[in-house]
Each structure stands twice: as structure tokens, then as C-alpha cells.
Amino acid sequence: MTAAPNPIQWLGYSFGRKLPDSMREWVRNDLVGDWAVPRHLVRSMVPFLPVFVIFMLFPGPWALRASMVLLGVLLALFYSVSYMAQNRSRRLERHGLPADLENAKKMSRQDAEKAAYEKLHGPISS
């Protein structure tokens, strides 16, 4: 079993810090393993938590403050999804892994789809 980061290390990792080399397999699984996208979305919200807390401390009705937080969450999620591939590549490189590393299940599924398409319609020309 690979070593997992402790909570302090995970917080640093969420903010972009590099984990020790002994956790390289954990990082590989975190970034390209099953459930990598939901983990990315959760991890990407961590740096915004202080901003969301500050929004809740603003004066005014509770619904207005909650709306500010919701708008912030939606905007943060939009950018997180938009830059997910670049973020994954940067994190992989930082941890000494190939930047183009992909999920093995996803790659085999894509290869099977390509083979089925080529069987039906002929080879794909580039």
C-alpha cells in the first residue's frame, strides 16, 4: 500500500505544494486514477474556503451571504473544470511523472471505441 499524505501535507498539496517522492504512487492515483475528477473538484475548492468564510461574515441577510458563497463556488468550479487538464499535467510533472499520463481504464475504453469505429468505417486518417 502506498503512503498517503497526512492532513497537513494534503492541505499543502491542495495549495500546489509537492509531496515527498515516497508518495509518488499516491499522487499518480490521485491525479489519474478512478474518481480523479471528483477529487480534483474537492481539492480545488480548498484554497477558496477562506474567501467563502469571509463572504459569510459580511453584513446583511443570510440569503444574500449564501448567494455570494454560491456564486463564488460556481465561479471557482467553472475555472477548476476549465483548467483541470493543465493543472493535472503541472502536478504530474512536479511529482516526476509524465505530464501526459492518463487513466488506464479510460485509455483502454478509447482504444476499444477507436477499433470499433475503424472496423465499421475504415481507418482514421490524420
Image (tube, rainbow, N blue to C red):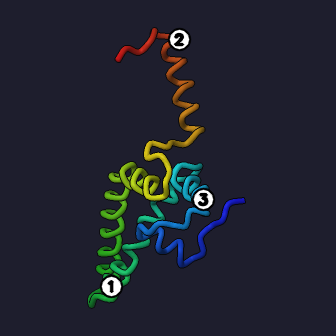
Query: Is mark 1 in CB contact (under 8 Å) with mark 3?
Result: no
Residue 119, x across and y down, in percent? 53, 11
Q: Which mark is residue 119?
A: 2
Residue 21, x across and y down, in percent? 56, 62
Counting residues from the start of the chain, the first of labels 1 and 3 encountered is: 3
Mark toward the viewer: 2 or 3:
3
Quarter-wise, where is residue 108 in the image?
top right
Query: Could you tell whether 7 is left or right of 86 in the image?
Result: right
In the figure, 51 relative to 110: above or below?
below
Q: Secondary structure at mark 2?
A: helix
In the figure, 30 relative to 11: above or below?
above
Residue at x-position 53% and y-position 24%: 113
Query: Could you tell whether 99 is left or right of 20 in the image?
Result: left
Q: Secondary structure at mark 3?
A: helix
Q: Which residue is mark 3?
A: 26
Residue at x-position 59% and y-position 70%: 5
Q: Which residue is mark 1?
A: 54
Q: Which mark is residue 88?
A: none
Residue at x-position 41% and y-position 67%: 16
Mark 1 packing: few (<14 Cα in 10 Å), some, or many (20+)? few
Residue 55, x across and y down, in percent? 31, 82
Counting residues from the start of the chain, the first of labels 2 and 3 encountered is: 3
Q: Secondary structure at mark 1?
A: helix
| Amino acid type, label 3 | Trp
Mark 2 packing: few (<14 Cα in 10 Å), some, or many (20+)? few
C-alpha span from label 2 to label 3: 38 Å
Mark toward the viewer: 1 or 2:
2
